[in-house]
Amino acid sequence: MKRYAQILWGKAHWVFEAEEVPEFAPDIVIVDITDKPEVQEGWDYDEETRDFTAPVVPEPTPIEPTPTLEEMQAQTLLNTEYLVSRSELLGGM
């Protein structure tokens, strides 16, 4: 039994076993991966070198925590005090 991978958009889309390459539509790319047992669905495929590489999953971008109600109220108070003090310094222009 041989191992094959269907290539779609530069990735191993479907990995399967068969006695021989099945006949699909001519635009479906099938690659023999019998000698590459590590290849899994989702791996990247380079058409020029015919090499597979495990996908690199980027580290997730940390999400800043949502401010609490108290923090938002404190920021609003600071902004209001700042605007009032500026207005007083400029003489109410």
Image: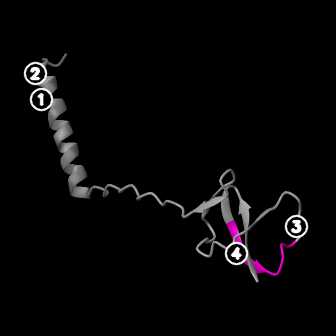
Mark 3 or mark 2: which comes first in sequence? 3
**Are the two marked residues, 1 and 2, in contact with CB atoms closer than 8 angstroms?**
yes
Give SS at disc 3. loop
Residue type indicated by callout 3: Phe
The residue beneath circle 2 is: 89
Give SS at disc 2. helix
Residue nearer the viewer, 66 or 52: 52
Give SS at disc 4. loop
Q: Nearer the viewer, mark 4 or mark 2?
A: 4
Q: CA distance from mark 4 to mark 3?
A: 19 Å
Whole-percent x, y for residue 39 in the image: 61, 71
Q: Is residue 36 magenta?
A: no
Whole-percent x, y for residue 31 in the image: 74, 65
Question: What is the magenta range?
Answer: 13-22
Mark 1 or mark 4: which comes first in sequence? 4
Q: Is residue 20 above or below residue 52?
A: below
Q: Residue at horizontal 67%, vertical 57%?
A: 50
Q: Residue at horizontal 83%, vertical 72%?
A: 21
Mark 4 or mark 3: which comes first in sequence? 3
Whole-percent x, y for residue 32 in the image: 74, 69
Q: Residue at horizontal 32%, vertical 55%?
A: 64
Residue type indicated by callout 1: Ser
Whole-percent x, y for residue 85 in the image: 12, 29
Give SS at disc 1. helix
The residue beneath circle 1 is: 85
Residue type indicated by callout 2: Leu
The residue beneath circle 4 is: 34
Q: Which mark is residue 24?
A: 3
Mark 3 or mark 1: which comes first in sequence? 3
Q: Residue furthest bottom?
A: 1
Q: Answer few, some or many: residues within 10 Å of disc 2's Cα (few below 14, many 20 plus, some between 14 and 19).
A: few
**Are the two marked residues, 4 and 3, in contact with CB atoms closer than 8 angstroms?**
no
